């Protein structure tokens, strides 16, 4: 019995020693600006995100949490374009391919490339995004800007826009 207990303690200690460091936030920010119409812009400050020092990264958000300058734009966005009652969430799950270049113990700005699956409007596409990881006082912030082509996700942007530029910023705790 003592040998089993000792074995369990050793296994637990080794597992804990090799555990990855996880960072998370519930108030990340994603904003977008329509490329065809500078008046179409919105921001969502309720983005949930996880980042691990092994490179795993994820973002998840409710589409209804995007805020527009005009209530009518918000209504059209949710009802006509992204159909947020039918497709309430957008998600990204992927990996930072060059995570070994990031030193989470040293302040600095590190270039990062994330590859993974973006799910929007019921469609999942594999994407690659270039961005940065900024480490300050042991806390990382992820930033990235990338285009989203509406038709790639079966969103009819006719009359409004064919593409939006997304801007992500997440400060992790």
Image: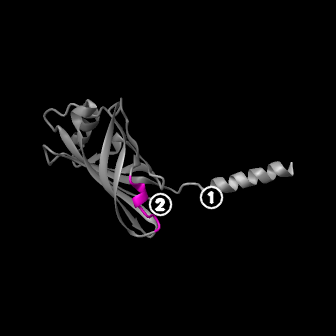
Q: Residues within 10 Å of mark 1 (few under 14, many from 20)?
A: few
Residue drawn at x 41%, y 54% is: 27
| Marks 1,2: beta carbons within 8 A | no
Could you tell me residue 67's position as x and y percent?
29, 47
Mark 1 or mark 2: name the one nearer the start of the chain: 1
Location of residue 163 by image quarter: top left
Residue drawn at x 75%, y 54% is: 9
Give the residue at mark 1. Answer: 17
Residue 139 relative to residue 147: left or right:
right
Residue drawn at x 83%, y 51% is: 3
Could you tell me residue 16's position as x and y percent?
63, 56
Residue 34 relative to residue 10: left or right:
left
Q: Residues within 10 Å of mark 2 (few under 14, many from 20)?
A: few
Could you tell me residue 150's position as x and y percent?
23, 36
Calculate the distance from the C-alpha at mark 1 to the C-alpha at mark 2. Answer: 21 Å
Give residue 173's mark: 2
Find the residue positioned furthest to the right. 1
Question: Which contiguous range is marked in magenta?
Answer: 98-105
As helix, strand or loop, the secondary structure at mark 1 comes to: helix
């Amino acid at each position: 019995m003592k040998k089993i207990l000792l074995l369990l303690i050793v296994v637990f200690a080794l597992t804990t020693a090799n555990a990855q460091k996880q960072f998370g936030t519930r108030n990340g920010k994603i904003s977008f600006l329509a490329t065809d119409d500078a008046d179409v812009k919105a921001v969502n400050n309720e983005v949930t995100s996880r980042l691990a020092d092994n490179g795993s990264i994820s973002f998840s958000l409710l589409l209804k949490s995007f805020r527009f300058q005009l209530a009518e734009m918000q209504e059209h966005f949710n009802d006509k374009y992204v159909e947020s009652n039918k497709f309430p969430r957008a998600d990204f799950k992927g990996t930072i391919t060059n995570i070994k270049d990031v030193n989470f113990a040293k302040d600095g700005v590190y270039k990062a490339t994330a590859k993974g699956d973006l799910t929007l409007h019921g469609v999942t596409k594999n994407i690659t995004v270039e961005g940065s990881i900024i480490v300050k006082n042991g806390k990382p912030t992820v930033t990235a800007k990338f285009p989203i082509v509406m038709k790639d996700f079966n969103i009819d942007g006719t009359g409004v826009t064919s593409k939006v530029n997304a801007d992500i910023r997440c400060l992790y705790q």
